[in-house]
Structure formats: C-alpha cells, structure tokens
Image (tube, rainbow, N blue to C red):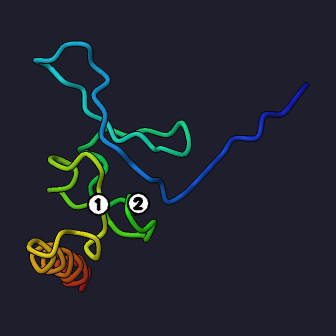
Amino acid sequence: MVKIKEKTCPPHKYRRRNLSKDKENPYLVFKCMDCPHYIKTEMAVGLEARCFKCNGKFFITAKQASVIAKPTCPNCVSKSDKGKALEEQVDNILDTILKGI
C-alpha cells in the first residue's frame, strides 16, 4: 500500500472561482492555488490567507469574500483604498476583542 503525501499549505493562497456551469446561479468558492483545498466564499470570512502580491498573511474580510477575485493584504491595496482597508481591519479586530470581554 502506497501512502500519498497530501500537500498542505496553511495559510492558503485563495482565488475566487465559479464552480457552476449556470451563469445565473453561480456557486462561488475560494480555491487555493497551491493545493486542492477550496471553501465557499461566505465561509472564508475571517480565515487567514496569503496575499496574492506579497505572500504576507492577513484575514479575509466580508468585502474581499464577496467582491475581490484575488484577495490581497491591506499593505498591498491600492493607495486610494489603503487607509479604508486598514481601518476596516482594525475595526474588525477591535470588535472581536471587545466581544470577548
């Protein structure tokens, strides 16, 4: 019996894909580019991922899960959106911390 070594790569480097052939009812998932892992986009919010541009680690936001095909970290977001993205991520972290208290 041959053991197949499964490639794992946490955190994953996600890209949004449509698995449905029906254009009117898309089945959107985030597929890892380095391994066979995929997850439905709604369930990816809050997961740790790797940035497409710099390979840095970050957490996927609700906006990135619903709109962006290649999620990137706040440091790599275009300069016009950089402050908004960073502020949103700080707010999310603070909300999480304050709920735990």
Q: Are marks 2 and 1 in contact (CB under 8 Å)?
A: yes
Foreground: 69 or 26?
A: 69
Residue 48 sits above or below residue 98 on the image: above
Element at label 1: loop
Element at label 2: strand
- Taking the spot 19% from the left edge, 81% from the top edge, the residue there is 90
Q: Residues within 10 Å of mark 2 (few under 14, many from 20)?
A: many
- Which residue is identified by label 2? 49
The dot on residue 84 is none
The quadrant where residue 41 appears: top left
- Taking the spot 15% from the left edge, 76% from the top edge, the residue there is 79
- Taking the spot 84% from the left edge, 33% from the top edge, the residue there is 3
Q: Please identify the quadrant where the N terminus is shown.
A: top right
Residue 69 sits above or below residue 62 on the image: above
Residue 32 sits above or below residue 53 on the image: above
The quadrant where residue 64 appears: bottom left
Residue 27 image position (x, y, % from top left): 24, 26
The quadrant where residue 25 appears: top left
Marks 2 and 1, how far apart in space? Answer: 7 Å
Residue 8 image position (x, y, % from top left): 62, 49
Foreground: 45 or 32?
A: 32
Q: In this rendering, would 16 be left or right of 36?
A: left
Mark 2 or 1, nearer chain start = 2
Q: In this rendering, would 53 be left or right of 34?
A: left
- Amino acid type indicated by mark 1: Ile
- Amino acid type indicated by mark 2: Ala
- Which residue is identified by label 1? 60
Q: Please identify the quadrant where the C terminus is shown.
A: bottom left
- Taking the spot 30% from the left edge, 50% from the top edge, the residue there is 70
